[in-house]
Amino acid sequence: MERLQKVIARSGIASRRKAEELILNGKVKVDGKVILELGTKVSENSKVEVNGVLISKEDKVYYLLNKPRGVITSTKDEHNRKTVVDLIEEDKRIYPVGRLDYDTTGIILLTNDGELSNLLMHPKNEIDKVYIAKIKGIILPKDLMQLKSGVIIDGRKTKKARVKLKKIDKINNTSIVELTIHEGRNHQVKKMFESIGYEVLKLKREKIAFLDLSGLKSGEYRKLNPKEVKKLYAIESEKQ
C-alpha cells in the first residue's frame, strides 16, 4: 500500500505537491470514489483517476541536458519559442525539474518522475546547485563575504552560500565568480549580485548535486544511468 499522492507523482502526471492539491480539490478518484484525504493509501490494483483520466504505470526516464542560451525552461511556450523539451527526442511526456532563465545556460534535468522532481525541488533536501557568473565590475572581498553570509532579495535573506572568485579581468572590468546555493528562488543568482551592486553578464549552472556537464556540449543531453537515479533518491535519506 502506498500514499495516493505518491502514486500520482510516480505516474508522471504531477509532482507530489501538485498531486496533493488535486486530491484536496476533489479531482482524484480511487475505484470510482472521490478521495479528499491526503493520507489515503491505495493498493497496486487500485484504479486511480485524475481529472477523469485513468493513470497508468509509465516507465520512468531521466535526462540531463546542457541548456543553450535562448531556450525556454518549459514544456511549451505561447510565443512558439524553443523549449528544453523540444531538444530531447522522447515520446513520453517529460518536464524540467526547476528552471533556468531564457539567457542562462547549463545543467537541467528532465523527467516524468514526479516523485524525484519533488525530492530535488524540496527546500529541506538542500540540493547544491553550482553557478558560474560573469559580472560587470571588479568584485570586492567584502562583497564576496556578503554573498557568502546571505543577502536580502525580495524582502528575505538568502541562506549561506559557498563563494569562490575564479578570475578578474581588469582590462574589461569583469569578474568571474563561482556560487553554490541550495535554494531555488526566482532569478536568485542574478538578484543576489544585483543586491550588492553588480550586473550579471553571463550565467551558467554547472552542477546539480553530484551531476555535472562532463562530455556534453551546449544543446546536448544524455540519459541518467540507474546508479545515478538511485544516488539522487538517496539524498533525501542522507539529509534526515
Image: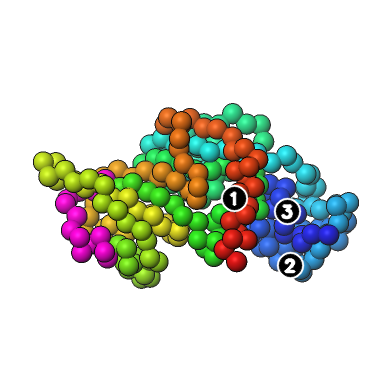
Separation of marks 2 and 1 at Cα, in angstroms = 25 Å
223 or 167, nearer to the observer: 167
Q: What secondary structure is marked by label 1?
A: helix
Read off the residue under disc 3: 8
Based on the displayed image, in which of its 4 quarters is residue 26 positioned?
A: bottom right
The three-letter code of the residue at mark 3 reads: Ile
Task: Check the picture and name the quadrant holding the N terminus.
Answer: bottom right
- Report the residue at 80% width, 66% height from top: 40
In-image side of 201 versus 159 (left or right): left
Does residue 84 show up? yes
Read off the residue under disc 1: 232
Q: Which numbered disc flags the more N-terminal residue, 3 or 2?
A: 3
Label 1 neighbourhood size at 10 Å, few (<14), some (14-19), many (20+)? some
The three-letter code of the residue at mark 2 reads: Leu
Read off the residue under disc 2: 38
Give how far across and how far down residue 208 sits, in percent: 48, 48
